[in-house]
Each structure stands twice: as C-alpha cells, then as structure tokens.
Image: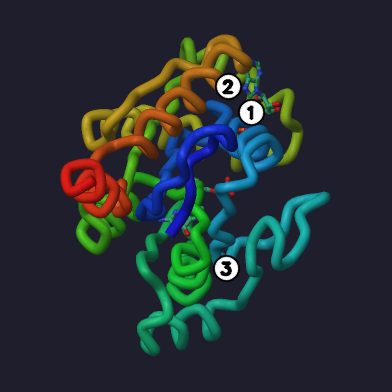
C-alpha cells in the first residue's frame, strides 16, 4: 500500500506500482533513476544481482549485489528471482523478496532492467507495472555519452554500441517512450508519468470505501 503525494489532500490507500526504466546502455537511465530516487520518497530501487564485476565507484548491495556465477545459478534454481536475463555475457536478476517487502511496506519499486526482464516482469505483474523506454537523441550522441562516462574499455563500448540498435528495436514493448535529449526535460516527463499512473483508478484501493461513504452519507 502507498499513499498519494499531496499532504493537503485526502489520503486514500493505493496499490504500489512497479516502475521500469529501460534503454540502450548509455542513453541515461541510471542518471534519471538516481534523480528520481533522490527526489521521491515513495519509490525505492530494486537492487539487482549480477555476475558482472563492479565498476569503479560501484558499491556492493547499493548498485548491485555482486555474486559469482555459481551463486547466481543457485539463486535461479531456488526461484529467488522475479526475472533474470543474460546481458553482455553476464547474468542479471531481480531478487524477489525485497520487491515483495517494498510493495508490502507501501513503496513503489523502480527497476533498471533490460527488455527481456521487462517482458518477464510484465508476465508476473501485469497491470501493476509501468514501463518506460529511454531513447538517445542520436546514435553518435549515445556513443559520445558512453565514451565520456569513461567507465568501460573500448571493447566493452564497441560491444554496447553494436547491441544498441537491437535493443532500440524493443521500444514498442513499453508503455511510454521518451527521448533523453535534455536530461531535466526528460526527468520532468518521468515525474508526470509517475504522478498520473499513481492516480489511476485501478490503483486506488481506498476509492470503493470512500465513494460508498459519500453515497450512503
Ligand atoms: P545508462 O544507465 O543508460 O547506461 P547513464 O545514466 O550512465 O546511462 O548515462 C551515460 C552518460 O551520459 C553519463 O555520463 C551521463 O552523465 C550522461 N548523460 C545522461 N543523460 C544525458 C543527457 N540528457 N545529456 C547529456 N549527457 C547525459
Ligand atoms: P550495466 O552493466 O550497464 O549496469 O547493465 C547492463 C544492462 O543490464 C542494462 O540494460 C540494465 O538495465 C540491465 N540490467 C540490470 N539489472 C538487471 C536485472 O536485474 N535484470 C535484467 N533483465 N536486466 C538488468
């Protein structure tokens, strides 16, 4: 359960939602996700497990749970993932328990996952999921961003660029598609989408009782 954002309005119970941001690597989804997490107390990040080695500055348990392949396989076998996928030769998965706990505690959950994971999550969560795909303004800008980010070797950047076009091909598996040209403008659109999605009637569990009281009163 979660509450609406406006403290001066009547607070009705609503269902938490699963908010997915996907993009080809380098389009800016981590930047946008970080801004959202800083500015919105009602949403928390689902921290994925991965077999990829940590990048400089990444913190275990905060950015990812960094695990070895054997541990990851055991987690798959134990049904510990809501979804998982192989991306760039490494495995990535969403641990089930923390997501269920966050929803239970009235938090919306933010996912930075690829299109394969988004499809699997949609099978599990249906109407509770809101899917946003972030596009770069151009392919050259995407490559510039990956190079300026300076977190990956040339080989890794080339690999990410060669995968970008096939990832972009999955844009139509999403509810919203945004072009991240200006980061502030794109972020504003994300906050509008989130605000509107939170207000959807199907998420407003408290409406039935509220409307009944109005009618009976
Ligand atoms: P992703 O998580 O999609 O791989 P990042 O959020 O790491 O991408 O962004 C890649 C790089 O591009 C980062 O250095 C980030 O600061 C930069 N960036 C993100 N959005 C924009 C934007 N709208 N304009 C210019 N640079 C951006
Ligand atoms: P990166 O190595 O750049 O952190 O992530 C590479 C890709 O893996 C990104 O597209 C990211 O969204 C995706 N990813 C990260 N965590 C998960 C996850 O738990 N599940 C899936 N399916 N993809 C993930």
Disc on res. 146: 1
Separation (CA) of disc 2 from disc 1 = 5 Å
The reply to whether the C-beta atoms of the residues labelled 2 and 1 are less than 8 Å apart is yes
The residue lying at 58 percent from left, 21 percent from top is 143
Q: Is mark 1 within 8 Å of ligand 1?
A: yes
Residue occupied by mark 3: 51
Disc on res. 143: 2
Residue 119: image location, x then y, percent: 26, 51
Mark 3, other Cα within 10 Å: few <14 / some 14–19 / many ≥20: many
The chosen color scheme is rainbow
Toward the viewer: 209 or 213?
Answer: 213
Q: Secondary structure at mark 2?
A: helix
Mark 2, other Cα within 10 Å: few <14 / some 14–19 / many ≥20: many
Separation (CA) of disc 3 from disc 2 = 24 Å
Q: Is mark 3 within 8 Å of ligand 2?
A: no
Disc on res. 107: none
Mark 1, other Cα within 10 Å: few <14 / some 14–19 / many ≥20: many
From the image, which quarter does the N terminus lie in?
A: bottom left
Separation (CA) of disc 3 from disc 1 = 21 Å
First in sequence: mark 3 vs mark 2: 3
Toward the viewer: 16 or 208?
Answer: 208
Does 185 sit above or below residue 151?
A: above
The residue lying at 56 percent from left, 12 percent from top is 185
The residue lying at 29 percent from left, 53 percent from top is 205
């Amino acid at each position: 359960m979660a509450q609406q954002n406006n403290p001066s309005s009547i607070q009705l119970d609503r269902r938490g939602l699963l908010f997915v941001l996907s993009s080809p690597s380098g389009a800016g989804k981590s930047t946008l996700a970080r801004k959202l997490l800083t500015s919105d107390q009602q949403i928390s990040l689902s921290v994925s497990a991965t077999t990829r080695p940590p990048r400089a500055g990444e913190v275990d348990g905060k950015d990812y749970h960094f695990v070895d392949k054997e541990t990851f396989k055991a987690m798959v076998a134990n049904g510990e993932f809501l979804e998982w996928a192989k991306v760039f030769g490494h495995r990535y998965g969403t641990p089930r328990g923390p997501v269920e706990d966050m929803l239970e505690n009235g938090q919306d959950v933010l996912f930075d996952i690829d299109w394969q994971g988004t499809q699997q999550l949609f099978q599990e969560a249906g109407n509770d999921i809101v899917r946003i795909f972030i596009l770069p303004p151009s392919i050259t800008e995407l490559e510039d961003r990956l190079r300026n980010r300076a977190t990956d070797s040339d080989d890794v950047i080339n690999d990410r660029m060669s995968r970008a076009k096939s990832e972009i091909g999955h844009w139509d598996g999403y509810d919203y598609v945004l072009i991240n040209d200006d980061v502030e403008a794109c972020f504003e659109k994300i906050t509008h989408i989130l605000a509107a999605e939170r207000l959807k009637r199907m998420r407003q569990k408290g409406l039935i009782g509220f409307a009944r009281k109005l009618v009976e009163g």
